Image: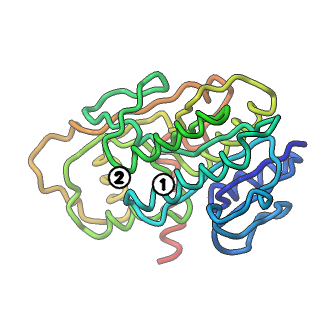
């Protein structure tokens, strides 16, 4: 039985916590608001940045899974970099440091000319928010044996933004490559990484979590529009083949036996569409 801290016990964190409790681990979860935690989780409610060191338990493995309050530089720094400094302060001088996993984003790869990206590709952030993510990764790596878990666009239950965009009829804009991962597959990847850490397997400094199926954004929207009986909102005259974005694949998790429940957007969004239509 290991001691595991999940700093950021929201949707992803709660799913991860449930799986780790089922495996018999002692799990502590922190969330900024609300007191509802999965069964078996020792819950702490409050702002991590304001917590004293003695509030945070000893841990063998730590997951940092934060969600910013906005998509601007200030919100990202508060959610990611500042919370990472709390973990560094608490755990860096321990005789036995925890293994730290930071749930980051493939946005640190700023390449956008249709390039193929994998775990050997250097991060080249081009936005302020992506720069903060990379700064956070580097800050943790300087203090711990840490892993940046770089997720592509996460979708799944309750995440209706793309469906609502298609229904709105607003113009689809220029076509580009898009990369996705279902939240359930993110959780299974994090469970696998925890088990790799606890069994002392070597893990790369950064791991990509994606469904391995880069796809044209117009293809996804066209499929959703057909399912939703919505307008196809393409006004531009350019071709269907994307000329921007990137195509992402990751190999480490597959090499460790990870298997995707949703290997493309089609099975994942079919489930989400059923949920969405039931609410309308």
Q: Cβ–Cβ below 8 Å for labels 1 and 2?
A: yes
Q: Residues within 10 Å of mark 1 (few under 14, many from 20)?
A: many
**Residue 31 spot, x, y in % from top left:** 67, 65
The image shows residue 37, relative to residue 109, as above or below, that is below
On the picture, is 78 further left or further right than 13? left
Residue 271 in view here? no
- Residue 42: mark in rendering: none
> Which x, y percent locates residue 127?
32, 46
Q: How is the image coloured?
A: rainbow
Q: Is residue 163 above or below residue 24?
A: below
Quarter holding the N terminus?
top right
Q: Which residue is mark 2?
A: 223
The residue beneath circle 1 is 269
Q: Residues within 10 Å of mark 2 (few under 14, many from 20)?
A: some
Horizontal relation, residue 157 to residue 3: left or right: left
Residue drawn where x is 78% and y is 61% of the image:
55
Residue 187 seen by the camera = yes
């Amino acid at each position: 039985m290991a001691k595991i801290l999940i700093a950021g016990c929201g949707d992803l964190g709660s799913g991860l916590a449930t799986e780790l409790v089922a495996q018999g681990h002692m799990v502590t979860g922190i969330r900024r608001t609300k007191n509802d935690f999965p069964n078996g989780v020792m819950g702490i409610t409050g702002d991590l940045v304001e917590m004293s060191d003695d509030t945070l338990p000893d841990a063998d493995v730590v997951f940092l899974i934060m969600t910013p309050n906005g998509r601007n530089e200030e919100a990202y720094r508060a959610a990611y970099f500042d919370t990472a400094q709390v973990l560094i302060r608490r755990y860096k001088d321990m005789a036995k440091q925890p293994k730290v996993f930071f749930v980051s984003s493939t946005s640190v790869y700023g390449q956008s000319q249709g390039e193929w990206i994998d775990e050997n590709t250097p991060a080249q952030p081009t936005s302020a928010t992506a720069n903060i993510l990379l700064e956070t990764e580097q800050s943790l790596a300087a203090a711990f044996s840490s892993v940046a878990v770089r997720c592509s666009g996460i979708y799944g239950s309750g995440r209706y933004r793309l469906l609502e965009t298609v229904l709105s009829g607003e113009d689809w804009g220029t076509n580009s490559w898009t990369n996705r991962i279902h939240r359930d597959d993110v959780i299974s990847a994090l469970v696998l990484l925890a088990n790799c850490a606890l069994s002392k397997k070597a893990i790369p400094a950064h791991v990509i979590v994606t469904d391995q199926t880069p796809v044209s954004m117009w293809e996804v929207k066209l499929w959703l529009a057909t399912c939703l009986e919505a307008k196809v909102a393409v006004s531009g005259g350019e071709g269907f083949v994307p000329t921007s974005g990137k195509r992402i694949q990751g190999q480490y998790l597959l090499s460790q036996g990870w298997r995707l429940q949703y290997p493309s957007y089609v099975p994942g969004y079919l489930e989400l569409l059923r949920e969405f239509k039931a609410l309308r």
